Image: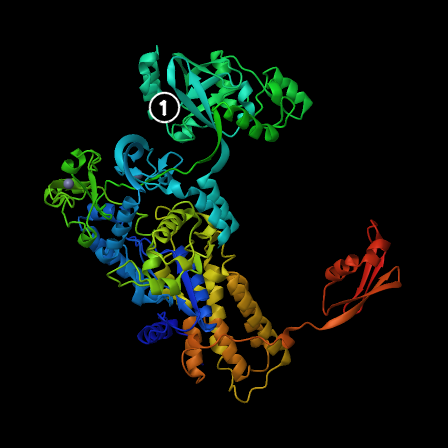
Amino acid sequence: MRKYNPKSIEQKWQDKWYKSSAFRAQNGSKKKKFYLLVEFPYPSGDGLHVGHCRSYTALDIIARKKRMDGFNVLFPMGWDAFGLPTENYAIKKKVHPSVVTKKNTDNFRQQMKSLGLSFDWSREINTTDPKYYKWTQWIFIQLFKNGLAYKDKIAINWCPSCKIGLANEEVVDGKCERCETKVEKKEKDQWMIKITNYADRLIRDLDLVDYLEKIKTQQKDWIGESHGSLVKFEVEGIEELIEVFTTRIDTIFSGTFLILSPEHNFINKYRNKIENIEEVLQYRENAKNISDIDRTNQNKEVTGVQLKGLIAKNPATNEEMPVWTADFVLDHYGTGAVFADAHDKRDFKLAKKQGIPLRTSIKPDDEELSIKVKNLEECYEGEGTLYNSMQFDGLSSADAKPKIIMWLGSKGLAQPKISYKLRDWVFSRQHYWGEPIPMIYCKNCARLPGGQGWQPVLEKDLPIELPKIKKYKPTDTGESPLSAVKKWVDVKCPKCKGEAQRETDTMPNWAGSNWYFLRYVDPKNNKELAGDKLLKYWLPVDWYNGGMEHTTLHLLYSRFIFKFLWDIGAVPKNVGSEPYQKRTSHGMVLGEGGIKMSKSKGNVINPDAVVKQYGADTLRVYEMFMGPFDQMIPWDTKGVVGCKRFIEKIYKLSSKSEFSSAEESEKLKKLLHKVIKKVSEDIELMKFNTSVSSMMEFVNEWNASENQLNKKDFSDFLKILSPFAPHLSEELWDQAGFKGFCCNQKWPKFNQKLIEEEKILLIVQINGKVRDKIESNANISQKQAENLALKSEKINKLVGDDKPKKIIFVPNKLINIVI
Ligand SMILES: [Zn+2]
Ligand SMILES: [Zn+2]
C-alpha cells in the first residue's frame, strides 16, 4: 500500500516549479494579461500568520486557475519593510534595522515557498531598497513641484510612548494604533500632502470600479462629502467677516449665537477686542489636552466661554448674536465656526446651561413633538417645515435651503459650498527607519524676494540614501535622529550652491506602498519608476485583495497617488485613472474558540508547524474549507485533520486500479462534471469553501463506487484539484504518466448535457382533483414541490390564504394539497 508523505512530495515539486520558472509572468506576450495582486506584508519578526496564508492561498488559487484558463498572469510578491516594529526591535536587540529586515524577509520568503504559492519571484521588491525608494522619493518631488506637498505648522497627534507624530488615520479612539497609549497634541512643522485636492475624484471615480460595496461606502464616509453653504456673519467694529459652513441653512432664522472653535484664528487676531481674553486662552489651553473624539462626544458635558465684547449679526434676521467658544467645535472641520440654534443638541445644551436665548424655526411632522420643540422642552435636529422664517414660512427644509442661499447670496452673505471631512495628509515622521524626504532648506534662497527656502534634491542625485548610523533611537525632543548626523545634514543648496541643510524627517510607512504595484511591472528599471510599454500592457490591476483595515488608509492613498501620477503623465493615459479594477477583502482567522490570536494568550497557530505536521496541501485546503472567505473564522484543529483525510483518500484512490481498462459509472461521471462546473464558478466568486466541499462529495462517491475513473476524467479531476492542493495533484499527475506540469494544463470544460437535470411533469392536485401539471427537476423534495405548486397561479388562486390541512407527496409523480 502506498503511503501519502507530503514532506517528500512538496519540496520536490516546489523545486521543479521554481527551477523551470513555471509561474513567471511574460512581458510582451500575445496572451491576454491578468494582473492579480495581494497586499504585500510587513515582514515582522513573528513570521507569517495563518491569516496571511488564508488570503495568499485564495489568491494563489485564482492565479493558478487563470493560468490554466490561458491568461498571462502577473502574481507578484514583495516587502513593505520600513516601519516602527523593525526599528523598535532593532533598538532593543542592538542590531541594525537593515539586518533585521533581511532576516525577516528571508524567513517570509521561505515560508511562502513552503506553501507552494505561485508568486513570480523574479519581480520581488523591497521598499527599503534604495533602488526602490529612489522612486518613492521621486514621487515626493513631483508632488512638491506640482504644489501638492507643503510645510505647515500644525498640531499633530503625538504618541508620547512611540515618540512619533501620527496621522489621524493612525489614531484609534484617541489612542496610538500601535501601542495604545493616549495620544497628545503637539505643534510641529510637518510636510503635508494635499490629498484634499482629489477628494471629489476619489469619490466620483468609485463608479468606475468593481469594489465590494462596503469598501466603497467606507471610502465615501471617510472622505465625507457634504453639500451645504458658506454663510458670512458681520461682527460689530471688525471689518473681517466670520465664515460658517453649514448643511442646515434652513435653520438660519433660529440662529441666536455664534460659536468659534477655541483654536479659531479670529480669536488670535482680535484678542484686543475680547474683554475676557485671559479666560478664553485658558479655555483653549485646557481643550488642547482633550482628544477630538472626547470633544465631540455627544454624552459629554458641554462647556464654553463667551467672547465678551464681540457681537455678530444674523444675516437673515439682522439680530445681534453673542459670540462664544466651545471645544465641541473643531477647528479643522468646516470653517471651525458654527451658528448655534435650538436645532442642534449641543448648542441647545450650552444655551440652556448658560442662559443664552433660543428660538426655534423648524416644525417636525409629529404634532405632539412639535409643541415640545416650540416650548423648548426638547431639541429637534431633523428637517421639517419652516416657521419664524419670514417669506420662507411653510416651506420644507429641502425646498427652503436653495432659496435661502439665493436670497442671502444676493446680498453677498452666502454661497453654495461642498465640504469634505478628509484632511490633508501629514507626511513627516521623526523616525530613522523610513525613506528620507528629498528636500533641502536653504536660508539664502529663502531671503530672496519671493524666495522659496525649500528646494527639492536634483533628480540626478536620487536616491538620497538613509545614512548607516549607530544612534537611531527617537529623541525626546521630537527631532528625527537624522538631525544629529551633521555630515549628512549639511549639504550644498541645489539652486544657489550655498550652505544648506537636508530635511531630517522621514516618510510615513504608507509612502512605499502607495505605488508598489507599478514597480512589479518593471522592477529593475533604473530610468523611470516603470516603463510606459509595460505599464500599458499590465495595468490596471485586474483584481486586488486586502484587509478591510486598509480601506481608508492604503487603498485611499494609493488611489490618490495613482491619479496624481496619471495626471502628470508618469502613467500612460490609456490605462485609466483608477489603479485597481476590482477589490475584495478577506475575513480574519481567529484562535480556537473564536478569540483573537495573540502571543500573550498563547493561542497563535504557526503555519510552519502545521505544514510540518500535515503538509502544505492540507493547510491550503483547510484554510479554504474553514468557512466563507469574507468572514471571521476560528481555527479548528479537527477540521485540519479532516482535510488531511480527504487528501489521503485521493492519494489512495488514485492507485485503485489501472485507468486504461477502467469502466466508469454514469453516476460518477455526471457528478464529476457537476463538480467541474461548481469549482469553475466558485473560484471566480471566492466561494472556496463550497468548491472544496463539492470535491469532497465527489471523492466520497468515488470511494464508494466499485468502478474507477477513466484516464481522461481522472486527469480532469486532478486539474480542478490542483489550485487547491497543487503538490498532490502534480505528484499524482506524474505517477499516472501524464506529460508536463499539471498546473500548466488547460482548465477542463464540463459537459452541459451531463449535468442537466432529469425533468418530470409534476401533477398537482387539490383535494384529489388534478388542477395543474408543472415541469420540474426530478428528485425534488416535498417542500420544494409544495413551493413550486404554490407558485402556479392556478393553484395559488384555489388555495388562497387557506393553510393546507394536509399534503400528500409521491416523489417524481404528484403532490396533493388538501384544504
Ligand atoms: Zn505609540
Ligand atoms: Zn539656495
Residue 806, image quadrant? bottom right
Would you place residue 35 above or below residue 149 in this image? Answer: below
Residue 134, image quadrant? bottom left
Name the image quarter holding the N terminus: bottom left
The residue that appears at 35% across and 72% down in the rendered structure is 14
The furthest residue to the bottom: 661
**Residue at the spot of label 1:** 264
Decide which of 586, 287 is in the foreground and name it: 287
Q: Quadrant of ligand 2?
A: top left
Question: Are there few (<14), some (14-19), or many (20+) residues within 10 Å of tag 1?
Answer: some
Q: Is residue 2 visible?
A: no
Q: Is residue 134 visible?
A: yes
The residue that appears at 28% across and 53% down in the rendered structure is 81
Left or right, 131 with respect to 364, comes to left
Q: Position of residue 776 (x, y in %)?
A: 74, 67
Colour basis: rainbow
Decide which of 694, 740 is in the foreground and name it: 740
Image mark count: 1
Asked if the residue at label 1 sits under 8 Å from ligand 1, the reply is no
Q: Position of residue 744 (x, y in %)?
A: 42, 76
Left or right, 687 with respect to 308, comes to right
Q: Position of residue 664 (x, y in %)?
A: 59, 83
The secondary element bearing badge 1 is classed as loop
Name the image quarter holding the C terminus: bottom right
The furthest residue to the front: 410
Decide which of 423, 88 is in the foreground and name it: 423
Q: Position of residue 432 (x, y in %)?
A: 21, 45
Would you place residue 707 above or below residue 500 in this image? Answer: below
Looking at the picture, which amino acid does disc 1 mark?
His
Would you place residue 799 above or below residue 29 in this image? Answer: above
The residue that appears at 50% across and 16% down in the rendered structure is 256
Decide which of 178, 270 is in the foreground and name it: 270
